[in-house]
Image (cartoon, grey):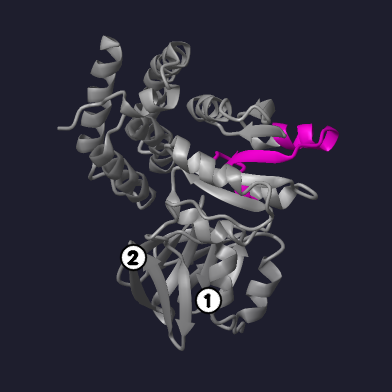
Amino acid sequence: MEQPNMSYINSLSGGDKAFEEKLIAIFKMEFPEEKKIYLCNMENKNFEMASQNVHKLKHKISILGLEKSYRIAANFEKQLLQGDASLVKEFETILSIIDTYLKKL
Amino acid sequence: MNCIIIDDDLTARVIIRQLCLNYPEITISEEFSNAIEAIKFLNRNEVDLIFLDIHMPDFTGFDFIETIKNPPKIILTTSDSNFAIQAFEFHCIIGYLVKPITQERFEKAYKKVSSSGVVKDSDEPTSSEKVEMNSGNDLYVNIDRRLIKIDIPSIYLIEAKGDYINVKTEAKNYIVHSTLKKIEEKLPSELFLKVHRSFIINTKKIIDIEDNSVLIKKDVIPVSRSNRPELIKRLNLL
């Protein structure tokens, strides 16, 4: 499974450590909350709302350089609108990987 | 250049601010997490450029553009590349940036701000999903770069789902990036009727009608008060 990386964030920051720290702080603040809301919507089988949550999480996935995971998230977002949650395991594995990565930062 | 950012995602707003740092002439005067607040701001203030997210809950970027009078130049920012075709329907949109936005793509879009032409980002979609054409009884929809034929009479329901529509047929359902308004124009009006702002039904597939709802297959569809007279008119009432 591919691993998150800081390539995109580094390319944006151009060495601006304050920006990097700010972005990481936002990730650490927003990600657990967005994940929680997503899990809650999945539990309640509110797939339309969960699809919106996946859309938002998808941006963070792309920022962390997870290209394959981004494609899974994009498909999952679309499938949820059809009431299809078959990619749930793959998507939640991605969330766990990000979780672990953010905790190490 | 006086700019504002509209995006429900704080991460996205912070990134756009960072990208703007390379352009001293850009002043980000405000940023908004929802379009409604931005509209209030624009009622009192003038701006030269808006960085606008499309996919926001409740009120999308396109809803925003349709709401404001004399929109300034707009650079769209989105995670979905398949909005580009819809974007080019608006003259005020001069750029289209797919997230995550790189410095190079940002620069390319920003360079076009001074011109009034519509600019396409290098990530212009190749997988746009939209209602493509109508040939007789067939409707072609573009899904993942494939034009898929749908037999129009087999459609029994079309439901708006945010920026998508769910086209339900006897055989299967199709999620298409389009609007009810667009597909309505492609469908024979004698067969299809918009009964609610989120639903178009095939009137031949109705099973029964209650006061303010209609049963089609297993779906119970609400009927707006304003659309009910037209629906009743279409029925062969005894």
Which amino acid does the dot numbered 2 rest on? Arg
Asked which secondary structure carries label 2, the reply is: loop
* Location of mark 1 (residue): B203
> Residue B50 lies in what quarter of the image?
top right
Residue extending farthest to the right is B44
Farthest residue to the left: give it. Answer: A1
Question: Where residue B127 appears, x then y in whole percent?
Answer: 37, 60
The residue nearer to you, when weighing B164 against B197, is B164
* Chain that bears disc 1: B
The residue located at (50%, 45%) in the rendering is B97
Residue at position x 63%, y 73% in the image: B231
- Residue B87 horizontal side relative to residue B42, left or right: left
Which residue appears at 67% of the width and 31% of the height? Answer: B26
Residue at (44%, 48%) from the top-left corner?
B80
Relative image position of residue A76 (x, y in whole percent)? 31, 44
Q: Which mark is residue B79?
A: none
Respond whether the residues carrying marks 1 and 2 are from the same subunit: yes
Dot in front, 1 or 2 = 2
Tell me which numbered mark, 1 or 2, is placed earlier along the sequence.
Answer: 2
**Image quarter in which the C terminus of chain B is found:** bottom right
Using the image, determine if residue A50 lies above or below residue B133: above
Quadrant for the N terminus of chain B in the image: top right
Chain letter for the residue marked with disc 2 in the picture: B
- Magenta residues span B37-62
Note whether B51 is above or below B93 in the view shown: above
Whether residue B226 sits left or right of residue B103 in the image: it is right
Could you tell me the amino acid type at mark 1?
Thr
**Which residue is more in the foreground, B2 or B222?**
B2
Residue tagged 2? B145
Reply yes or no: does residue B224 show up in magenta. no
Mark 2: give few (<14), some (14-19) or many (20+) Cα within 10 Å: few
